[in-house]
Structures are given as C-alpha cells and as structure tokens.
Amino acid sequence: MKNKKIQIRIAILFTALLFFCVINCPAHDEPLTVPKLTFVTGTNKGEIRYSWTATTSTGIVNYTLLVLKGWHGADEVTAYGSWEAAGADAQSGTFAGEAGEWYSAVLVVASGSDEVFSDVIRTKARHTGAGEFDLRFGVISDVHVGAGDSYPTYQRFEKVLDWYNTEDVTALAIVGDITENGWQSEWNTFKNSWEGHKGKLQLVAVMGNHEIWDIHRYGDNNETINNATDRFEAATGQKTNAHYVINDYHFIVLSAGAGNFTDTGAMGGAIATGRTDTPGTFYGNEIPQSVRDWARIRIELAKADAPGQPIFVFLHWPIRNTFLGSEAGSSTPSFGINPLTGFFKDDPEVIIFGGHHHRPNNDPRSIWQGGFTAVNVPTLNYMGLGSGYLGNSTDGVTNSGRPKIAGQPVGAGQGMIVSVKGSKVIIENYDFDFNEGPQPLGNVVRIPQTWEFDVSQPFDFPYTNARRETQKTAPVFDRTLVTIKNITDTTIEVEFPQAKIPGPNYGNEIVFSYRFDFINRQTGVVERTVRQWSDFMLHPRLQKPTYTQLIGGLTPNTNYELRIYAYGSFQECSTQYLTCIVYSEHPDNFP
C-alpha cells in the first residue's frame, strides 16, 4: 500500500513538472525548419504516397499534412485543404484519392505559436490499377519544333512530355512533322527537349513531310531528301519504317517515299526496319508499293504472333476518306480511295493513326471504322478545320481555315492515351490548354470523346458510317434572344445563345457550326449566307454559353431578316432557328 502511495505521488509530481515546463519553457531552442515533404504518385489505383522527415529543431513540434484536390497554390491549400496526416515525428503513408486526379499538398510545422509551411507539392493519384491494362501509350502529332513565336512549340512539347509522365504510359508515338523545316538546329532542340523531359517514355517516331520541308519548299539544292532523312534517323535513333513490339503488342511505322525498299534489320529498338531509295516525300500520296508490300508482311506476322490483338500502325497522312478531314488533298490514296475495299479492308486488328491536317479531336468523326480503324491525331501547333467557314476572319467576309481562339490564335494542343487489354481498346483524348499560351499542368483536361471497341468483334464496331446514320441528332436552342452588338451599312455583329445537342446523344455529337442567312424582307431572297464553327474546339474553360460573330458583305440600306441555324457533328440541321430584324445602315445616319 505504501509503495502504491509513493508511485501516485511521483506521478503527480511528474505531471506538475511537465505542465510547468509546457507553460514556462520555450517550445524549441532554435527557429523552426521545414522538413522535406515527399508527395508522389503511388503504386495502386488512386494512390498517392507521402512522407516527411523530422525537423532539426528541438522542443515540442507537430506536423500536419494538408491536401486539397486539384492544382492549387500554397495559400489555397493552407486555407481550404483537409487534414490527412499529423504527428510529432517523421511519418510516411498513403493517401487514397480519385484515380487520375491532381492533388496539392502542404506540410505545416508548428511549435507553440510558431508555424512554418512547406512549398506546395502537386501530384496525380495513380490513374490505373495493377493488371487493369496490358499497355498504355500516348499519341501526338505535328509538333513542328521550330515554329511558334509567342509560345514556341518546343516548350509545348516539353509540357506534353511532363504531363505524359504523370500518367501510367509506357511509350509516346509522334506521328510526323516533328520539326518545322527539318533543320539540324530544330533537331538539336527536339533532342534537348526529349532527353530533358522524356522520363521513362519510349519513343516511336514517324517521319512527315515537314522533315523535308526545307528541301521542297525552299529548294535547297545543296541537300537531298536522304540528307534530311539522315537527320531524322540520327535525332530519333529510329528508321523511317519500323516494326516494334511493346509489352507484346505490335507497332508498325510507315513512311512515304519512292523506289526500292532496303531491309535494314533490327535496330533502334525495332524488330525490323527498312528504308526506300528516296525516303519521304512532300506529298502524302506517295506511299510506294515497296512500303505497302513490307507493311503487309509485317501485319501478317503480327497477326500470327498475337492473334486477335490490336496492331497499331502509324503513318503521317490519313488514309483517304476515313475520319473527318481525310478527303482529297490532305490524305493518301495509296491504300485505296474507298477504305471499305482498300488495302486494310480485311484487317480489323489494325488501328492506324494519322495526323497532318491539324484537326482537333472534339468531334466524334475523328475516328472511323470499317474493315479496320482509323484515328485522327491532333497537333501541338495550330488548328486547321477546312474551308467554307469564316474562322478567324477579321472582316466577316473572307473565309479562313483556322478557328477563332478566344480572340488570339496562339496555339493548339491535343493528344491521346491508348489503353489496351487483350483485344479491347480505349482511346481517351486530352486538351493541353495551349489556346492562350502557357498554363499549369493541372489545366490539362479530358475531352468528352472517349472511344471504346473490341478488335475481335468487327461486326460490333461502334464508329461505322452506317451506325452513325442512325445516330444523327439535330441541335436545339433553349434560349432565343439575339443581340445586335454593332451594325454598319455592310456589317453586323450579333451575340446569340449557343445551341445544344439534346439527350441521349448516342453519337456523342457536338454543335459543330452555325449558318447565318440574311433574307431580304422586300424580295424574300436569301442574299447572303455564311457559316461559322462553334467554339467546340476550345479548351472547356474558354467555351461560353453565348457566341459573338461579325458578319460582313451586307448590302447597304437593306431590311433583312437574319436566321441562325445550328448543325451537329453529322451535319443534321436544327429545325429551330434564331431570328431578328436587321436594317443595314451606317450609324452616322441614325437619328
């Protein structure tokens, strides 16, 4: 009993001394220092791993890890972040986030009334789980290193590489026009960017027409196409025609050219390579028979080696009459004018990627299926959308092939991730947010065009022309107000609510364009008709609920009825139209 009383007295005395020390003693003997915080992508789906070391400060020190979903600054995290871990010493653990989402973290170190904060660290929760896919790889095209004044394309390329390294991807295919002119200085820039930012990515390089642009466009008589091709091969470490096997899936790279095909064996990471007498041409309709023969051999070998699995083929030029923009002049007819009866008609395993025409992938027509699958690959340089639309016209009269981009066409940038499991393929499209210059990595967003299919089930391909005929949906306007913002005797600027595609939208269409009809109210004749794309191609943060358009070419002193129609992806016109009465008169004549 006596010993128990002594123990109680000792405990009381110790507690009193500890309380006295906390109240009267300094919390630490030296300024607080911020320990090293690690906040990185984990190994399991949705996982992030964190750890921190203990500070060298003495005294009572507490650590708190604050985490906020999204790409944020330190002030936002400290103000709104949630408590995820805490302790009085070094610590490590895992944080369960949403797969593929960014998270921002700050470590708070406190002792008494003193606090210090770590720099903000941002990382992405792991996108996929173990065994979810056999392979994931990225695809981009038309980088055009050497182009871009206010936001050079090599800087865009570096950002893209950094972003792909936050995803669970093994390789990156670049489908041609890697440089602007094929100059050695541009290849040096490419190599510096690639080596500095590639991370763990494996390169699959395709030669385009701009790799020999200098020779064809500028007529450099001191060089030959073979010299330009040598620069391509030296910078990329790859041949112009090559067959790779990555994670047991076959990748086949094809290039234009002329003459005989020389087998150059296994090199540059490929199991087979080759080069024509004249490797590469300015025009895409020159894929010689020798290359096509080699391609057929490689495709059949791939089928035999991996039955029922997709075979990925890369060629700078689109196959004629497949996806949007593959019409004459921007595609190759070398594999047949009609893709349903052409070279790949019996190759449901083949998924062929083509770039060249700089179209974005917001439109569902960017993928085509028949006897095979053809996929458009967007650019990192500038967008081109074809002819017959006002685009970025400044007078409202002349048409332009480039869209309006938030009033300042700085650049474009989209790419994709291909995920594979057996015979099943998922293609996700992403916007890198280059429209207005450099933006944070956290601004990269997935475009609402995700394509899923099974190459072993060609009769169920979801992206055939026949199936899309049954999916056509006309846009609708849910608001009708048209505002005349400015008017002269020959021009008018109008603002109107954007149309929408009503549900269920089985074809995943977008509102593609608008048609403006000016009807003379005296004669009933449509005197002027113009078309303009919607803002479907912009990064979501730049899309607006209303659209403003300047239209010129009106007849002075004429009373018009303006009607505005909307078109969906598959060119189904709205049955509704917006309307207003317009009198083209110069403002100086207004009372």
Image (spheres, rainbow, N blue to C red):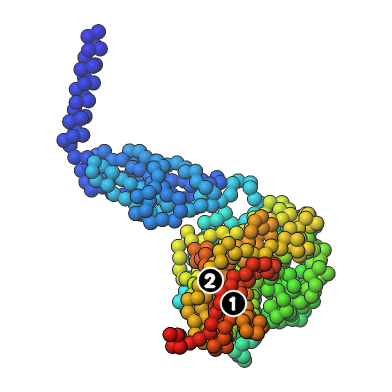
What kind of element bears circle 1? strand
339 or 591, nearer to the observer = 591
Indicate left or right for 549 with 301 as reference. left
Q: Specify whether residue 352 is in view.
A: no
Q: CA distance from mark 1 to mark 2?
A: 10 Å
Residue under the image location 64 percent in, 87 percent down: 216
Residue 212, quarter of the rendered image:
bottom right
Mark 2 highlights which residue? 482
Other residues around mark 1 within 10 Å, as few (<14) / some (14–19) / many (≥20): many
What is the total number of numbered labels drawn onto the structure image?
Answer: 2
564 or 305, nearer to the observer = 564
Q: Are marks 1 and 2 in contact (CB under 8 Å)?
A: yes
Residue under the image location 63 percent in, 61 percent down: 501
Which numbered tag is attached to residue 562?
1
Residue 446, quarter of the rendered image:
bottom right
Expressed as whole percent of the image width and height from the top left, the position of residue 34 reads: 31, 49
Which numbered tag is attached to residue 247?
none
Quadrant showing the N terminus: top left
Q: Residue furthest left?
A: 24
Expressed as whole percent of the image width and height from the top left, the position of residue 217 reads: 61, 87
What kind of element bears circle 2? loop
181 or 388, nearer to the observer = 388
* Amino acid carrying mark 1 in the image: Leu
Expressed as whole percent of the image width and height from the top left, the position of residue 345 reads: 81, 66
